[in-house]
Every structure is written in structure tokens, then in C-alpha cells.
């Protein structure tokens, strides 16, 4: 083994320029692999963070995933029961007995929950109207589950608790209606009820539709306005570990009976899109390494061709075919090891450089940095793929070297 | 004297569209410590016979026994292991590895056999170079040595694992007369002082004159009547 290694090293160092060129191919391949992978995965993480942070991890709706069985079917489960002319009961929709159910959810570890009653309403001010989604919230619970508190530019969620007739609206609506903090506007509910509310807070999320079409009031106020006393139609939940939402949602649904949807379930399409994007990205960056492996193939092939006499004498001296093969495979491994080591170092330098780049998107005040992901598995992936390409590239020449028949070469030389 | 090489009815046919018989029905015994020279016109099959006796090639029919061991049942790995431990080669071209020093070239078969530890292997290689008068050139690369010096390093390498037999294919073919004489004397000494058996193929009649026995080969057959210049 040591002999094979010495010969391999001697071959590579005796052809410094060619070795350096193929090594550079691997180094660049690994570095670009890392740079692209860290950017793509970084933007994916960034996107998911926005997705996860700006929407509840789990939402419990006032619906059931499956229609409830008719009492007759429950009473005689084995009978052929047909219930005709079933009409829905006229009832006030919403989650019934929500304080108990909320308490049951809050008893689970690692999550925070808040009750919400959402309905549609029309805001009018000085003859102008705007349809909005009106959310009734409990401020001290809401501020632990929603990021809306962080987006407040004026006032806080607690301002609602201080003023039962307060309303929090978005900057978009403020601009549209030319309002300011303290203005009074009228809320018109579906069934004709109306009430004058005072603006006690303003938020700005950057999402225009949301900033124009969302308003927050106290839960009690919303219940009265929408005519749904003691009801809520949503429990929104924030988890300590967003990625545990799927399991927690199932637990909650089993416990309270109402349909519980985690962000993972709700964003299935986006998650599968990201997966496809990653597969495409890794195929493309791996192609760079495949191209680099041609350089190695070329170098080692040339060495094998030039060294047929050496191979012949080594074989006559007592090197078996596999000993000779090993020499050239080791050459591939050496290039792979050095290539991936320097490639990772160069890649990290590239990633640092990318991270330092400052971008100012048009119309945005704050400076944005490229999202670079530093996850360790991409280094392993890049290095493993580089090693694999190097070994594959050296395998063919190595096999040819193993097949050299000493007598053929000796005859030719004599 | 004990027999080192025995060839029985050895024939080697090179397969192809027109099969060529390189060696035809050769019977041969070589004793321990003998200096045997194989001579013959160009293309007579003398090198082919040497490759067969040296287990580099396998006879189409017949059998070759070395040191009392019949080699006809050996596979490629078996033959290779046998060559490593018991045979040494010297060729017309030195075939030294260009990247390695004289000492490292001699060390190569010793390290491959892996019977000696590093210090012992080093001492052995140096001793061989010293015996061949090359100790002061041990760190030089082949390209820094003269033709005769290279051939002496090649002989040291052939002796590295203390083989029974040295097989030499035109060992003086590329050397001037002074160097030729040096190599000739060395090979002669090997049989006298070190008890090695030497089998050499040559065109050189001066080289042949120092041998214990000359074997003529014509058209792949042994022809004891053949003499250089006869045809």
C-alpha cells in the first residue's frame, strides 16, 4: 500500500502542471457547488422562515374534516340506515365552548394559542368604504402567537385592551382614507350593525392587500358586531419548534375534534416545489464536478499511457494487476482529497464574500444581505460527490493499466 | 548440482489470424549456479523462451518447473507472487522508474515483498548498490546516471529479493564496450560468488564467451549447432 502510494504521488508530482489543472477543476467545482448550494438553501430557509413566521404554525378551524355521523347511524352502526332529507341545523357557527378547548390546547407543551373570531365588515370614513377582514382578538394572548405586534408602527395590541372601542388598521388603509392615530371610523357588519371605532394602532407588514384589508378589534367587540356571542371561529397556534407542527396538529385535532391545519399541510405545494428546486440545483452543480472529472480522467490516462514501460517492469517484478490498478486509483483519491479540501476552503471564502454583499432592492429602505446557509451537510455532499467523480474518473485508466501485459511491452521495446 | 529450471516440451503459439509459433517443443534443464546464454538470429524466439522460463509468459503446451515446483497450475497472481520472491530481471532498457532515486528503485521489490522492515530493507538495498559500486550514486535519479550505471542499478534491483535466478534480456545491448564488459563481469561474479543462476539472451559473442553453456535457438527450436555468424 505504501509502495503504491509513493508511486502514485511520484506520478502526480512529476506532472505538476497537469495535476494542478485537474486539481483546480475539482477545487472550483466544489467551491461553486458550495456557493450555489448555500445560496439556494439559504433563500429556501429565508422563504420558509417568512412563511412560517407570518402565518400561524397551526390553525384550528370551526369545521370538521369529516362530516359528523347522523345520530341514527351512531345508534345502529351495523344496520342499513338511510337518513333522508338531512338539513343542516340553523345555529350560530363557531367553535363552541371555546374556553375549555383553548385550555385543553394550551395544556400541551411547546406551544402558545390565541382565540380569534374573524368575519367580514365594511369600514366607512368620510363617505369612503373599504371591505375588510375583521379579527377579534385577545391582545395578551395574540401578542405571543402573531408577529403583528412587531409590525406595529403606532400603538400596541394592548391599546385595544385599554380602549374597548379601539381598532387597529394597516398603513395602507390609513393612507387610503387619510386617517391618523385617533381618527374615528365606522364599522358596518354583515347584518347591518354599525359602530364607531377609534384608531388606536397602525401596523405595516409590507403586504399591500393585508395592510389595506385587515383590521383588529377586541374579541368581545367582534363577537357583538358579528352577532356571534361567546363564539370564536379560529384558534391560532405558534409552536416553539415549527417543524413539529404536523404531529401537534394531529394531536390537537384528535383532542378537540375541530379541523387543525399545520403550516406544513397548508404549504404542501410550496414545500414540494422547494424540493424539486433543490433536486434541480444539485443536479446542475454536480454537473460541474462531472466536467471536472474529465480533467482527472485525462491526466491519469496520459500517465498510464506514458508509464506503460514502468507498469510492465512493475508487473514483471511482482506487482499484481490489482496492485497496479490501486496505484492509479490512489492518484484519483489524492486529487479528490486535495480537491475537496481546498474546494471547501475556497467555497467557504466564496460564501463569506456572498454574505458580505449588500443589496438595496428598489423601493425598500433597509439593506438586504444574500441569505447564505452554513449547514454542514452541504460540505459533506460536495466532498463526497467530488471524491466519487475522482474515483470514477481514475477507474477506467486504472483498469487499463491493470490489463497491461508485460511481455507485449517488453517485445515492443526490445 | 541441483536443477533450478526444467522445461518439458514447451511450445508457445501466438494466437491470431495467422498463428505464429514462437517456441517449439523445447526441453531444457538449467542447474543451480549455472551461467547460461541463449543465442540465435533475430526473431528466432530466444526472448520468447526467456519470458517463458521467467514466468512472464505462459506456454501453450508443455510445462516449466522452477526450484522443483511445477508452475503450470499457477494463475496470474500465483505466477506474479513467484516472480516477486524467486526471479529477478534485467532488460536491454534499464526500465528504472524515472521519478525515483537509484536507492528507491532497488527498494521497490523489497518493499513490495514486505518481508523486511524499513531499516532492514534500506540496509539491504544499500548493500546491493555497494556491491555493484553504485553506493555513491544512491540518491541520483536514473536520468542523472550513465547507461552502464543504470544497468548496474537495474541488476541491483533484480537482486533485491535474493532471487534464485536472474533472467537477462540483452543486458548489454545498449551499452558501450567498457560498460558491457562491466555488466558481463558482474553477472559472471553473481554465479561464482553469490551462487545465483543466470539465464541471458544475447547477440554479443564476447558476452557469450564467458558463459558456462550456450544454447542456440533457431526458429523456436533448440539447435546446438548454431554459432554466431553462421546464420
Image: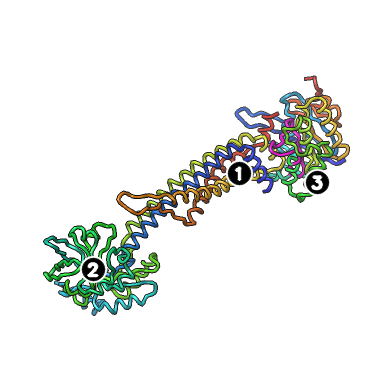
Q: Is residue A173 left or right of residue A370?
A: left
Q: Is residue B52 left or right of residue A360?
A: right
Q: Residue at x 29, y 63 (%)?
A: A153
Chain-order first, disc 2 or disc 1: 2
Residue B102 lies in the magenta stretch: yes
Q: Quadrant of the C terminus of chain A?
A: top right
Report if residue B58 is visible in the image. Answer: no
Is A382 situated above or below B187?
Answer: below
Is B29 situated above or below A52?
Answer: above
Is the residue at mark 2 from the same chain as the one at mark 1? Answer: yes
The image position of residue A318, as x and y in percent, is 71, 42
Is the residue at mark 2 from the same chain as the one at mark 3? Answer: no
Q: Residue at x 37, y 54 (%)?
A: A274
Q: Residues within 10 Å of mark 1 (few under 14, many from 20)?
A: many
Residue B64 numbered tag: none
Residue under label 1, please give it.
A331
Q: Chain of mark 3?
A: B
Q: Quadrant of residue A23?
A: top right
Report if residue A131 is visible in the image. Answer: yes
| Gap in angstroms between the C-alphas marked 2 and 3 | 95 Å
Which of labels 2 and 3 is toward the front? 2
Q: Which residues are magenta?
A: B82-103
Q: Chain of mark 1?
A: A
Residue under label 3, please give it.
B123
**How many badges with numbers are in the image?**
3
Residue under label 2, please give it.
A200
Q: Residues within 10 Å of mark 2 (few under 14, many from 20)?
A: many
| Gap in angstroms between the C-alphas marked 3 and 1 | 29 Å
Amino acid at each position: 500500500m505504501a509502495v503504491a502510494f509513493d508511486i502514485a504521488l511520484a506520478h502526480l508530482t512529476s506532472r505538476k502542471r497537469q495535476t494542478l489543472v485537474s486539481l483546480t477543476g475539482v477545487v472550483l467545482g466544489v467551491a461553486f457547488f458550495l456557493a450555489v448550494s448555500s445560496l439556494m438553501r439559504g433563500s429556501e430557509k429565508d422563504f420558509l422562515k417568512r412563511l412560517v413566521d407570518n402565518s400561524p404554525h397551526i390553525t384550528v378551524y370551526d369545521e370538521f374534516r369529516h362530516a359528523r355521523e347522523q345520530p341514527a347511524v351512531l345508534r345502529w352502526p351495523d344496520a342499513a340506515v338511510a337518513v333522508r332529507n338531512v338539513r343542516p341545523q340553523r345555529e350560530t357557527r363557531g367553535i363552541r365552548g371555546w374556553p375549555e378547548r383553548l385550555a385543553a390546547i394550551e395544556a400541551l407543551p411547546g406551544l402558545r394559542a390565541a382565540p380569534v373570531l374573524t368575519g367580514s365588515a365594511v369600514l366607512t370614513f368620510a363617505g369612503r368604504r373599504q371591505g375588510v377582514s375583521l379579527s377579534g382578538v385577545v391582545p395578551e394572548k395574540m401578542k405571543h402567537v402573531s408577529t403583528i405586534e412587531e409590525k406595529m408602527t403606532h400603538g400596541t395590541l394592548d391599546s385595544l385592551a385599554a380602549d374597548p372601542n379601539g381598532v387597529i388598521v394597516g398603513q395602507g388603509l390609513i393612507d387610503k382614507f387619510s386617517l391618523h392615530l385617533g381618527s374615528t371610523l365606522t364599522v358596518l357588519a354583515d347584518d347591518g350593525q354599525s359602530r364607531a371605532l377609534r384608531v388606536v394602532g397602525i401596523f405595516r407588514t409590507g403586504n399591500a392587500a393585508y395592510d389595506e384589508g385587515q383590521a383588529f378589534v377586541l374579541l368581545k367587540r367582534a363577537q357583538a358586531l358579528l352577532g356571534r356571542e361567546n363564539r370564536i371561529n379560529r384558534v391560532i397556534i405558534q409552536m416553539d419548534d415549527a417543524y413539529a407542527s404536523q404531529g401537534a396538529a394531529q394531536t390537537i385535532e384528535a383532542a378537540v375534534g375541530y379541523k387543525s391545519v399545520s403550516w406544513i399541510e397548508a404549504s404542501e405545494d410550496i414545500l414540494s416545489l422547494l424540493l424539486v428546486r433543490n433536486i434541480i440545483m444539485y443536479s446542475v452543480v454536480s454537473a460541474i464536478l462531472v466536467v471536472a472529472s474529465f480533467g482527472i480522467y485525462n491526466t491519469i490516462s496520459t500517465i498510464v499511457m506514458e508509464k506503460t514501460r514502468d507498469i510492465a517492469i512493475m508487473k514483471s517484478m511482482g506487482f499484481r494487476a490489482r496492485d497496479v490498478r490501486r496505484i492509479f486509483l490512489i492518484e484519483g483519491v489524492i486529487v479528490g482529497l486535495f480537491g475537496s479540501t481546498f474546494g471547501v476552503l475556497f467555497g467557504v471564502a466564496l460564501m463569506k464574500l456572498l454574505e458580505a454583499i449588500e443589496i438595496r432592492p428598489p423601493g425598500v429602505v433597509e439593506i438586504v444581505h444574500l441569505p447564505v446557509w452554513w449547514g454542514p451537510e452541504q460540505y459533506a455532499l460536495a466532498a463526497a460527490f467530488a471524491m466519487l467523480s475522482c474515483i470514477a474518473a481514475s477507474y477506467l485508466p486504472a483498469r487499463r493499466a491493470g490489463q497491461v501485459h508485460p511481455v507485449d511491452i517488453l517485445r515492443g521495446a526490445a | 548440482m541441483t536443477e533450478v529450471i526444467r522445461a518439458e516440451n514447451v511450445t508457445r503459439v501466438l494466437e491470431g489470424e495467422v498463428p505464429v509459433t514462437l517456441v517449439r517443443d523445447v526441453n531444457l534443464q538449467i542447474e543451480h549456479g549455472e551461467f547460461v546464454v541463449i543465442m540465435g538470429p533475430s526473431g528466432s524466439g530466444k526472448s520468447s523462451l526467456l519470458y517463458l522460463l521467467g514466468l512472464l509468459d505462459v506456454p501453450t503446451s508443455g510445462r516449466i518447473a522452477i526450484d522443483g515446483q511445477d508452475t503450470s497450475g499457477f494463475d496470474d497472481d500465483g505466477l506474479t507472487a513467484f516472480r516477486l520472491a524467486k526471479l529477478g530481471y534485467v532488460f536491454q532498457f534499464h526500465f528504472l522508474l524515472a521519478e525515483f532515486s537509484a536507492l528507491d528503485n532497488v527498494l521497490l521489490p523489497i518493499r513490495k515483498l514486505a518481508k523486511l522492515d524499513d531499516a532492514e530493507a534500506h540496509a539491504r538495498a544499500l548493500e546491493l548498490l555497494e556491491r555493484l559500486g553504485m553506493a555513491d550514486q544512491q540518491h541520483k535519479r536514473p536520468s542523472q546516471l550513465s547507461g552502464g550505471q543504470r544497468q548496474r542499478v537495474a541488476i541491483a534491483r533484480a537482486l533485491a529479493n535474493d532471487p534464485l535466478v536472474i533472467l537477462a534480456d540483452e543486458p548489454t545491448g545498449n551499452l558501450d564496450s567498457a560498460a558491457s564488459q562491466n555488466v558481463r563481469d558482474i553477472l559472471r561474479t553473481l554465479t561464482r560468488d553469490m551462487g545465483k543462476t543466470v539465464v541471458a539472451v544475447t547477440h554479443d559473442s564476447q558476452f557469450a564467451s564467458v558463459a558456462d553453456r550456450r544454447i542456440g535457438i533457431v526458429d523456436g527450436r533448440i539447435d546446438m549447432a548454431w554459432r554466431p555468424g553462421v546464420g
